[in-house]
């Protein structure tokens, strides 16, 4: 068995490249390459490789990825739908926390930064936590009203 080096890629692309390298190798030896601390062989089927690396067949892995993407997309759409409501909320909550001279800027960036975030950030976080995220205003103590 001959060990070769592959540089980056997915399981599929590495397996494909390993197969191409084996076809071009005149020795006829089985080629072995390390992938995420596991190994791929030039004789592996898709399922052999996926089972060794992920513990799932390729079909099981692909279905898990499809479900994850579907779930992520649903969460993203739900978050996007809430942006107008959240924008209004954080604009109101900022009054009395952020100094008046910065409120116009705050009002402009809130919807933009809400669009950058996803549902993982707690939308009911205290305003000072949002201030850290939205425009890094909190990093400048002159911009936050102290009570």
Image (tube, helix red, strand yellow):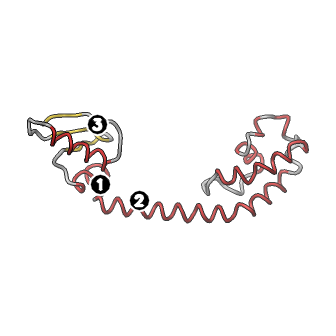
Q: Give the number of marks.
A: 3
Q: Residue at x 16, y 48 (%)?
A: 43
Give me the C-alpha separation between circle 3 and circle 1: 21 Å
Give me the C-alpha separation between circle 2 and circle 1: 14 Å
Measured as percent of width and height from the top left, residue 35 is found at 30, 41
Secondary structure of the residue carrying tag 1 is loop
Q: Residue at x 30, y 50 (%)?
A: 12
Q: Nearer the viewer, residue 67 or 22?
A: 22
Which quarter of the image is occupied by the C terminus? top right
Q: Nearer the viewer, residue 38 or 18?
A: 18
Q: Which residue is mark 2?
A: 65
Work out whether mark 2 precedes mark 3 in sequence or the reverse, and give the earlier one.
3
Secondary structure of the residue carrying tag 3 is loop
Closer to the eye: label 3 or 1: 3
Secondary structure of the residue carrying tag 2 is helix
Q: Which residue is mark 1?
A: 55
Badge 3, how many Cα within 10 Å: few under 14, some, many 20+?
A: some
Closer to the eye: label 2 or 1: 2
Measured as percent of width and height from the top left, residue 14 is found at 29, 44
Indicate whether 77 appears above or below 114.
below
Q: Residue at x 71, y 51 (%)?
A: 112
Q: Which residue is mark 3?
A: 6
**Would you say 123 lies left or right of 42 here?**
right
> Going by the picture, which residue comes out furthest to the front?
24
Measured as percent of width and height from the top left, residue 117 is found at 64, 52
Q: Quadrant of residue 34?
A: top left
Q: Nearer the viewer, residue 79 or 56?
A: 79
């Amino acid at each position: 068995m001959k060990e070769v080096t592959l540089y980056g890629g997915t399981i599929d692309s590495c397996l494909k490249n390993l197969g191409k390298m084996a076809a071009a190798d005149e020795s006829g030896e089985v080629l072995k390459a390390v992938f995420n601390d596991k190994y791929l062989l030039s004789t592996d089927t898709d399922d052999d490789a996926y089972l060794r690396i992920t513990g799932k067949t390729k079909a099981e892995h692909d279905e898990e990825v499809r479900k994850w993407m579907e779930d992520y997309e649903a969460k993203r759409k739900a978050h996007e739908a809430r942006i107008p409501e959240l924008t209004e909320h954080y604009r109101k909550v900022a009054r009395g926390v952020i100094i008046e001279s910065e409120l116009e800027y705050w009002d402009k960036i809130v919807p933009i930064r809400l669009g950058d975030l996803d549902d993982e950030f707690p939308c009911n976080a205290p305003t000072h936590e949002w201030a850290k995220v939205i425009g890094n205003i909190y990093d400048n103590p002159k911009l936050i009203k102290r009570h």
